[in-house]
Image (cartoon, grey):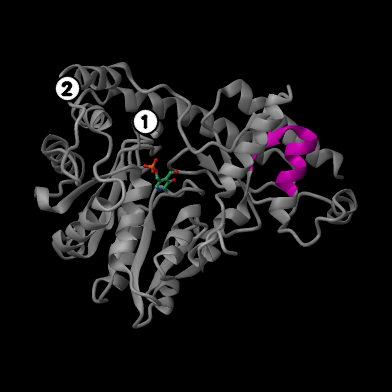
């Protein structure tokens, strides 16, 4: 107790990282583990982006930059918003952080007061709820269902808004479900929000990974009034295979940006100068690398959904974006037989027992749905080769067959 601060009582260690660590430990023992846990593209960062970092180093861009990012990167972000989202921002509306995660962290630290409520549609990205708790806010989880394509309904949203609601988190395409909202869907949600005194935090990190010709929209793109209410988070991690470079950015009200700048100025200061140069090239340079990556993900998406749907009892929505599938598993196994095989684990959530067993006995790493607020499902990332996907799904099918 002496060594641990009280504020950590509200935070869970990341379950995604825990699964990945266990899978890596088994691999180190020589086991042939198929890892569906990763939250990052399996492609390398494109050459022209790496080269921009090398040139930046050679030119001496190796010093502190302004806390909220270099002027040229912020200008590239402003251009990106104009080009891709038809949104106009000034430099005072933009902040660059150490990944989208830091931007989200600083956003909540800079806006929430103790007891402020944050509405989070579940299933949700693992970090949202913990970051809100760390910032002394209260996550209000609103369950969605595969029948509604994991989208929050306007009625559900409305019934959870209270005088304490400060933020509504919107994430499309979504981690973990891959569900993406159409413009019409977003309009229906925003009709509920438009007259409320709250901030919409739109997490657009999977903007570029979208399928079937679906056009990307976020709430800010719908009207100037909604733009005023919206804080956008985005970054280069997913679109350009740059997870390790740690560059994310936020756009919104200048007062929020100024406060986030203050927060960041007392923690990391600026994001790495060299990575900022690389991110600038990613946003301004040839965008063909995205097209190629999305094409590869799209092929895998269709194949993995089809093969999962062939496993008796698996129910799997076709995702419209990101690189995850979120199959429902409640119908699949003989629960009594499974319990007999996993004695001693009764107190754990069902999806966790399932994933532990899958990893230890069948050497497949998947993330339990409970980590995202839905114990009926698993999350599988298809950011791995087609042959690994085939092998992994075959093993899952074998486990289900063995449990009959
Ligand atoms: C929904 C969502 N938002 C934000 C992030 C943060 O990404 P990064 O910090 O790499 O920019 C992630 C990463 O997994 C994510 O899935």
Ligand 1 picture quarter: top left
Which mark is drawn over residue 290? none
* Label pair 2/1, CB-CB below 8 angstroms: no
Q: Residue at x 19, y 31 (%)?
A: 63
The quadrant holding residue 234 is top left
Closest to the observer: 151 or 362?
362
Which mark is drawn over residue 60? 2
Q: Give residue 293's position: percent from left, percent from top.
A: 40, 26
Can you see residue 89?
no
Q: How far, Cα to Cα, is label 2 from label 1?
A: 22 Å
Is residue 201 toward the left or the right of residue 179 in the image? Answer: left
Is residue 273 toward the left or the right of residue 127 in the image? Answer: left
Q: Give residue 143's position: percent from left, percent from top.
A: 53, 66
Q: Residue at x 27, y 34 (%)?
A: 272
Can you see residue 181?
yes
Query: Which mark is nearer the camera, 2 or 1?
Result: 2
Closest to the observer: 247 or 194?
247
Q: Residue at x 15, y 49 (%)?
A: 87
Closest to the observer: 217 or 279?
279
Q: In the structure shown, which secondary structural element does the residue marked by tag 2 occupy?
A: loop
Is residue 278 toward the left or the right of residue 307 in the image? Answer: left
123 to 37, vertically: above or below: below
Q: Residue at x 19, y 16 (%)?
A: 58
162 to 252, vertically: above or below: below
366 to 3, vertically: above or below: above
Which mark is drawn over residue 242? 1
Main SS of the magenta segment?
helix
Give the class, few, some or many, for how many residues have Cα within 10 Å of label 2's Cα (few <14, many ≥20): few
**Where is the N terminus found, in terms of image quarters?**
bottom right
Q: Which residues are magenta?
A: 354-366
């Amino acid at each position: 107790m002496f060594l641990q601060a009280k504020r950590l009582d509200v935070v869970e260690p990341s379950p995604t990282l825990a699964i990945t660590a266990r899978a890596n430990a088994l691999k180190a023992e020589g086991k042939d583990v198929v890892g569906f846990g990763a939250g990052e593209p399996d492609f390398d960062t494109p050459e022209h982006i790496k080269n921009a970092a090398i040139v930046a180093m050679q030119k001496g861009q190796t010093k502190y930059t302004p806390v909220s990012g270099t002027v040229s990167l912020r200008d590239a972000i402003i251009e990106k918003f104009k080009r891709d989202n038809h949104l106009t921002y000034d430099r005072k509306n933009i902040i660059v952080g150490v990944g989208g995660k830091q931007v989200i962290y600083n956003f909540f630290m800079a806006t929430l007061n103790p007891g402020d409520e944050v509405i989070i549609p579940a299933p949700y990205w693992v970090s949202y709820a913990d970051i809100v708790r760390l910032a002394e806010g209260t996550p209000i989880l609103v369950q969605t269902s595969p029948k509604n394509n994991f989208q929050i309904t306007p009625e559900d949203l409305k019934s959870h808004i209270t005088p304490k609601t400060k933020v509504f988190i919107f994430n499309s395409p979504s981690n973990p479900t891959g569900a993406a909202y159409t413009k019409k869907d977003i309009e229906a949600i925003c009709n509920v929000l438009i007259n409320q005194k709250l901030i919409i935090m739109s997490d657009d990190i999977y903007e570029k990974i979208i399928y079937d010709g679906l056009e990307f929209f976020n709430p800010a793109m719908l009207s100037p009034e909604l733009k005023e209410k919206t804080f956008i988070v985005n970054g280069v991690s997913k679109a350009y295979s740059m997870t390790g470079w740690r560059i994310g950015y936020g756009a919104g009200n200048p007062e929020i940006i100024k406060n986030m700048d203050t927060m960041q100025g007392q923690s990391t200061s600026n994001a790495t100068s060299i990575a900022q140069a690389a991110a600038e090239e990613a946003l301004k340079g040839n965008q063909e690398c995205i097209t190629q990556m999305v094409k590869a993900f799209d092929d895998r998406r269709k194949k993995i959904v089809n093969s999962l749907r062939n496993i008796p009892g698996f129910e799997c929505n076709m995702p419209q974006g990101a690189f995850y599938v979120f199959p429902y598993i409640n119908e699949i196994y003989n629960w009594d037989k499974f319990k007999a095989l996993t004695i001693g684990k009764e107190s754990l959530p069902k999806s966790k027992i399932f994933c532990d067993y899958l990893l230890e006995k069948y050497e497949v790493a998947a993330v339990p749905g409970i980590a995202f607020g839905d114990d009926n499902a698993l999350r599988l990332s298809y950011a791995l080769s087609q042959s690994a996907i085939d092998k992994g799904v075959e093993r899952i099918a074998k486990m289900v067959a063995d449990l009959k």
